[in-house]
Image (cartoon, rainbow, N blue to C red):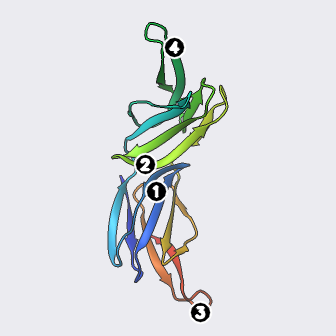
Amino acid sequence: MPITLRNTTQYIAQFVVRKGGQIIARLPGIAPEAQMTVPTADSYQVTAMTIIDGNTYTSAPMDVTGAVSFLAQVRQVREQGTYEFEVVQGYSTRPDQMQFQKTTIAPVTFTIEKDGVPLQAVVVADSFNMQSLDISDTFYVYAVVNGVTTDTFSTANPNATVTAVSDTSTLEQGYFTLETS
């Protein structure tokens, strides 16, 4: 199920697509009279990073699909005199959320990536306080065309076609809008 993004303006259109609160695409630009499809049901990679005693610790990437939870924690390895930073992946308590927690003193940044490209970061500053990211089935799309950001368009249709168009009405000349079909 892909959302199709089209650009009928005379400028490059940079689209951002969210599924709930999760950014699923941040496109560098679609040329005039071109289009691109964005899969709406896909897997992502999540890594976590924190700093302990001036050292940066980063988890291995974890493949993620759907509602999951993450718990970042530091374990002491006494035999080696070091720390081990680990992230435990579990089940979300809500079917429409990714959930992030930590037990470390320092903040933990969870980065969501697709094909090695960072899309979004969730920072958990307080231990045992869960940060949630909505991944409901409503899609939000906006575009930046010639330096102008369009209004955000929303749809529950995972197969929608969203087109960036030049608004040529008398009151709106020089502006851009999104239309769906």
The residue that label 4 is drawn on is: 76
The residue that label 1 is drawn on is: 157
Amino acid type, label 3: Thr
Between label 2 and label 1, give the one nearer the viewer.
2
Between label 2 and label 4, give the one nearer the viewer.
4
Residue at image position (61%, 30%) is 106
What percent of the width, then of the height, locates residue 89? 47, 25
Among numbered discs 4 and 1, the one appearing first in the sequence:
4
The residue that label 2 is drawn on is: 118
Judge whether 35 appears above or below 39 on screen: below
What percent of the width, then of the height, locates residue 64? 41, 35
Instruction: Name the element at disc 2.
Output: strand
Residue at image position (50%, 71%) is 144
Among numbered discs 2 and 4, the one appearing first in the sequence:
4
Among numbered discs 4 and 3, the one appearing first in the sequence:
4
What percent of the width, then of the height, locates residue 156? 50, 55
Q: Which mark is residue 170?
A: 3
Q: CA distance from mark 2 to mark 4?
A: 29 Å
Q: Is residue 131 left or right of residue 138?
A: right
Amino acid type, label 4: Gln
Q: CA distance from mark 3 to mark 2?
A: 40 Å
